[in-house]
Amino acid sequence: MRLSEEHRQLRDTVAAFAREVVAPVIGEYYERCEFPYEIVAKMGAMGLFGLPIPEEYGGMGGDYFALCLALEELARVDSSVAITLEAAVSLGAMPILRFGTPEQKRRWLPGMARGEILGAFGLTEPGGGSDVPGAMRTTAVLENGEWVINGTKAFITNSGTDITGVIAVAAVTGRREDGRPEISTILVPAGTPGLTVSKKYSKVGWSASDTRELSFTDCRVPEENLLGVRGRGYAQFLQTLDEGRIAIAALSVGLAQGCVDESIKYAKERTAFGRELARHQAIQFKIADMEARVHTARLAYYHAAERMLAGEPFKKEAAIAKLVASNAAMDNARDATQIFGGYGFMNEYPVGRFYRDAKILEIGEGTSEIQRMLIARELGLPS
């Protein structure tokens, strides 16, 4: 896929923002484990949260690929900021855009598009992991025109910030004839009685992003807060995750490219055994391998995005992109840390943050094992 002039301009604008606004200050936010509200506000003013949202709802009217390009450039500098944008748009706004009623769209999307409120995606549960439908224990019962929700969600991004507006919660709303759970999606506004937001997790990485556990105790919302068709909640989330995997692949490519950028810069500045580090062939080969991984991973997510925008099946391509890109991020983070030596173990250097941030990319929005399973199924292998 060749970038259009609009896509190139967007990429260059976000790249400059990441270098000039995010890079100088994000390390301090990271060290304090503090959510970067000022940066998020500036991203909102730029229209980044509204990139794939139609203009009628206050968005930029762009496409999903534009969001991916923005994520790549942000993650090239910092992944906490990038995942805040990814989760807010891909997991927060897109389900409402795809499946919401006109009233739900009018209520939530304009604020989301401006970055004034963040949406969250309540799927994973403490005892569930990858087995979402089989392990789901959160329930929603319809009583007197209200959904009464009980249960717990884990690892939910953007769920406890001061600007969190709504959480799309997957819950069991009944049983099918074959005994399988009927899963539906219900919108729960922040601050609803019965919704308890835990304190922030103490995380290995993504330290400047917001991730929390949520609990629901007789949490009541109106019947019209059902998102889409009753019983289609799991199918909605599967579609959302297919798209989200392309976005996570883009974020992973950004981190992997950031490792290359920092390694080249450091190798030219550092001397070892009387020579620039960059003149040692062992270092040159390591950086060359890193760049090859980035190039391959970028092509993979570009291809998946191209199929998605063309309306063609893209489940396999999205899984491949996510698998290849997250592997590239992890491998490049390890190699960059090795190139930096002791300094790579210090949080004041970006590669220290990259190393901490990379591992979750092989886990979140579908583990690497799940991606391999999806690819195998798409190839016709038995499940």
Image (spheres, rainbow, N blue to C red):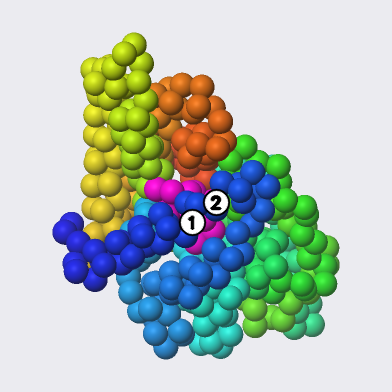
Q: Pointers 2 and 1 in contact (CB under 8 A)? A: yes
Amino acid type at circle 2 is Ile
Spot occupied by residue 125 in the image (x, y as percentages of width and height): 67, 49
Residue named by callout 1:
22
The N terminus sits in image quarter: bottom left
Q: In the image, which residues are magenta?
A: 74-86
Vertically, is 338 above or below 303? Answer: above
Amino acid type at circle 1 is Val
Q: Residue furthest left?
A: 2
Nearest the camera: 379 or 252?
252
Spot occupied by residue 289 in the image (x, y as percentages of width and height): 26, 28
Query: Residue drawn at (31%, 13%), measured in percent from left and top?
Result: 274
Q: Residue furthest top?
A: 273
Label 2 – label 1 distance at C-alpha: 6 Å
Q: Is residue 128 visible?
A: no
Q: Residue 26: which numbered mark, if any?
A: 2
Query: Residue drawn at (61%, 64%), measured in percent from left and top?
Result: 37
Spot occupied by residue 346 in the image (x, y as percentages of width and height): 56, 31
Vertically, is 59 above or below 34? Answer: below
- 179 horizontally vs 24: left or right: right
Residue 150 picture quarter: bottom right
- 309 horizontally vs 369: left or right: left
Query: Residue drawn at (40%, 29%), measured in percent from left and top?
Result: 336
Q: Residue 310: which numbered mark, if any?
A: none
